Image (tube, rainbow, N blue to C red):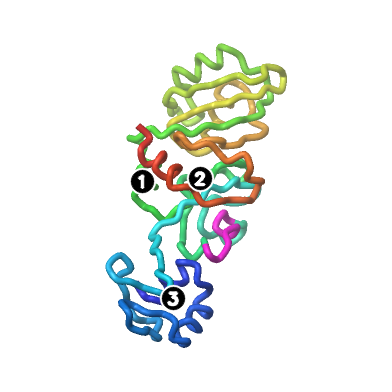
């Protein structure tokens, strides 16, 4: 990895800031001054210091975001703001990507990371990683719906979903529910309720696997996961 990219990734500023650090002779690799940003280093094997302090190399980043409406779960889009657009430079430099997708008008938990292995673990259909949603439903959700979701419902294209765990929080003409599913078909939650004659009005993802959305995060805010939270996602069993 180039020394300038490494230092930028580790939070030492923009590439321009890092260039000044290098020119100032404050960066050392194994005790030797390095001034050329193009120099390649192996951060796991070499000792890199800035102003005498050892650079703690962090190859991956893991972010929990409370996605607001109108934002796309993608790395780039020519028409809409994306979850990556909401990141500060110090986090965007890692080039994280959203794990899975939330619809533009759905809010809640989006996980962003540059850890491809974890992304695969969480998204593989074979892993059956549960995602939990809370929703406001137009129509009275009943115990019959709970049973139907347990069996799996047939969507508008003929696909029969895997069993879902539906919990009724409020049963009225405008109901409130919590739903846990283990797959992520296009607009799946909305289509599941459509299959039982109801309409999703508001939808929020509140949990991925064992990890709940931090209630302290306002819409559009995010934070890094703790080591314990990352491990909980890796060791879901």
N-term mark: 1 or 3: 3
Residue 134 coordinates in the image, percent (x, y): 60, 30
Q: Secondary structure at mark 2?
A: loop
Residue occupying image coordinates x 66% and y 46%: 218
Q: Residues within 10 Å of mark 3 (few under 14, many from 20)?
A: some
Residue at point 40% right, 86% down? 35
Q: CA distance from mark 3 to mark 2?
A: 39 Å
Above or below, 199 against 220 in this view is: above
Q: Give coordinates of residue 187: x percent, y percent.
A: 54, 37
Q: Are marks 1 and 3 in contact (CB under 8 Å)?
A: no
Q: Nearer the viewer, residue 157 or 48?
A: 48
Residue, disc 3:
50
Q: Nearer the viewer, residue 165 or 103?
A: 165
What residue range appears in magenta?
82-90
Instruction: Mark 1 vs mark 2: give the one in front.
Output: 1
Nearer the viewer's eye, disc 1 or disc 3?
3
Name the element at disc 1. Answer: helix
Q: Which residue is mark 2?
A: 101
Q: Quadrant of residue 125?
A: top left
Give the foreground label among 3 and 2: 3
Quadrant where the C terminus is found in the figure: top left
**Distance between the Cα atoms at labels 1 and 3?**
35 Å
Could you give the CA–CA distance between mark 1 and mark 2, rounded to whole angstroms?
14 Å
Q: State the residue position of label 1.
A: 120
In this view, 71 is above or below 8? above
Q: Position of residue 191 (x, y in %)?
A: 55, 30
At x 53%, y 45%, the residue is: 110
Look at the image and tell me in which quarter the N terminus lies. bottom left
Judging from the image, what secondary structure is the residue with disc 3 in? strand
86 inside magenta stretch: yes
Task: Tell me which numbered mark, 3 or 2, is placed earlier along the sequence.
Answer: 3
Q: Is residue 111 a member of the stretch shown in magenta?
A: no
């Amino acid at each position: 990895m180039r020394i300038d990219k490494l230092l930028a990734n580790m939070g030492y500023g923009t590439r321009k800031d890092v260039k000044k650090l290098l020119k100032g002779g404050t960066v050392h690799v194994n005790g030797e001054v390095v001034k050329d940003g193009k120099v390649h280093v192996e951060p796991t094997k070499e000792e890199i210091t800035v102003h005498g302090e050892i650079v703690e190399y962090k190859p991956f980043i893991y972010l929990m975001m409370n996605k607001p409406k109108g934002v796309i779960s993608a790395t780039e889009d020519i028409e809409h703001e994306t979850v990556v657009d909401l990141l500060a430079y110090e986090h965007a430099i890692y080039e994280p990507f959203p794990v899975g997708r939330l619809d533009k008008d759905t809010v809640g938990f989006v996980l962003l990371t540059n850890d491809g292995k974890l992304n695969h673990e969480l998204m593989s259909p074979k892993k059956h990683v549960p995602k939990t949603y809370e929703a406001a439903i137009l129509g009275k959700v009943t115990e019959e719906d709970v049973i139907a979701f347990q069996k799996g419902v047939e969507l508008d294209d003929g696909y029969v979903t895997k069993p879902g765990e539906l919990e009724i929080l409020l049963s009225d003409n405008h109901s409130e529910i919590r739903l846990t599913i283990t797959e992520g078909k296009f607009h799946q939650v909305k289509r599941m309720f459509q299959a039982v004659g109801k309409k999703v009005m508001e939808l929020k993802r509140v949990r991925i696997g064992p990890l709940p959305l931090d209630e302290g995060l306002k819409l559009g805010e995010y934070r890094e996961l703790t080591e314990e939270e990352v491990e909980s996602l890796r060791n879901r069993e």
